[in-house]
Image (cartoon, rainbow, N blue to C red):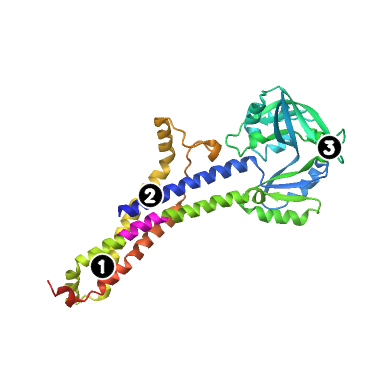
Amino acid sequence: MLGIALGVTVLITVLSVMNGFEYQIRNQFFSAAPAITVYTRQPISKIWHKLTKETEHIKNIETTAPFVSGKGMLINQGLVSPVETIGVIPVLEQRISSIPNKMLAGSFASLTQNSYHIVIGKKLAQSLGVVLGDKISLFISRSAAKAVAGPSELHQMTVSGIFDIPNGFGFESGLAFVALQDAEKIYARDAIGGLHIRLYDVFNTQAVSDELNLILPNNYYVSDWIQSFGAYFKSLVMQKTMMFIILLLIIAVAVFNLVATLMMTVNEKRSDIAILRTMGAPPRTILAIFVIQGGLIGLIGTVIGIITGIALALNVTHIVDYLQHLFHLNLISSSVYFVDYLPSRLQWVDVVNIALWAFGLSLLATIYPAWSASRTPPADALRYD
């Protein structure tokens, strides 16, 4: 009984922790990254109004925002860092991304036309040794065929904002934002523009992507989070499934002990079984006795495990935080797990599945001992009694 309870407790707790990690990762990712991105080589500042009207009737699209992107290098006093520069309209970008609301210093609204202001992440600012108001150089390398002012260009930018997204998938160390029109001037014909699209339901992305591919001309390219990060999120689901199967073996071990316990009970009660048979008890009655006994053991163990598992899953975050504080440990590192604490998210569907599996395995374990008891010959059992 305690073995089944322990297995159920561990399984509920571990799955709740994995649900917590998955929820936090998805929440952080989709708060900063668009669900769908439409790319084009056309000047986006001239066509984004028309492009928005073509997409606004599609069901599940919440809002859109134009952008221009390009690769470059940020340079400050000999310190160099690669960066992807995104040209945006601050008011519209705020409806797509949470980054404008995560400003540590300065303002995202400072990205005005012809200002050549730049907003960077906290980690990028630290690696370059810059603070708000500092001048920084943006180096752009061009191919000879596309060069406008030469094979490379150096643009002087002013840091007008620093954002901070803790554990933000590297967004704060590899992204920089400038005004949309400034980005078009900086990257010229190398610029890649388009629309960032936010959805009401990010798990219905494929249908929206398919519809966009149908209505947009061939010179547009549609990409979504499934193509870019789908494998990562699938691996999270696979990890949860494999963990469920592995930890289910703990319950299987306890169930194996249940088989052994019932077999010992059958051997111990052979004479009593024989007496019941001679008094007229049919085999199915003997079978039912041991099935009910094993089922009760499994049921009580499952209920105890559910109660303790739910209690532990709801409090595991506080318990781990207390242990870290008590022993001065850092068990959860944000550089590895994207969060600096142990998240837990209890899902009742997991509790129900675990309860059904635990109780079902317990009933399955009673079949052989109960069948063995029902097949006991009364004469042989009473011969030496």
**Depth order, front residue of 224/80:** 80
Q: Where is residue 95 in the image (x, y as percent from the top left)?
A: 67, 39
Q: To which residue does mark 1 refer?
A: 289
Q: Position of residue 303 (x, y in %)?
A: 34, 53
Residue at image location 55% in from the left, 36% down from the top:
335
Q: To which residue does mark 3 refer?
A: 188
Left or right of 373 on screen, residue 70 = right
Left or right of 245 on screen, residue 183 = right
Q: Which of marks 1 and 2 is nearer the N terminus?
A: 2
Residue at image location 56% in from the left, 43% down from the top:
25
Q: Position of residue 298 (x, y in %)?
A: 32, 58
Residue at image location 81% in from the left, 51% down from the top:
219
Q: What residue type is labelled 1?
A: Ile
Q: Where is residue 84 in the image (x, y as percent from the top left)?
A: 72, 37
Q: Which amino acid does label 2 sit on?
A: Thr
Q: Residues within 10 Å of mark 1 (few under 14, many from 20)?
A: some
For the residue labelled by badge 2, is the local secondary structure a helix, a strand or a loop? helix
For the residue labelled by badge 3, is the local secondary structure a helix, a strand or a loop? helix
User: Which numbered dot is residue 53?
Assistant: none
Q: Give the range drawn in magenta.
A: 248-257
Q: Earlier in the sequence, mark 3 or mark 1?
A: 3
User: Which numbered dot is residue 9?
Assistant: 2
> The C terminus appears in which quarter of the rendering?
bottom left
Say if the magenta span includes residue 253: yes
Q: Earlier in the sequence, mark 2 or mark 3?
A: 2
Left or right of 119 on screen, residue 300 = left
Quarter of the image holding residue 129?
Answer: top right
Q: Is the magenta stretch mostly helix, strand or loop?
A: helix
Q: Can residue 3 be seen in this view?
A: yes
Q: Do the residues labelled 2 and 3 touch (CB within 8 Å)?
A: no
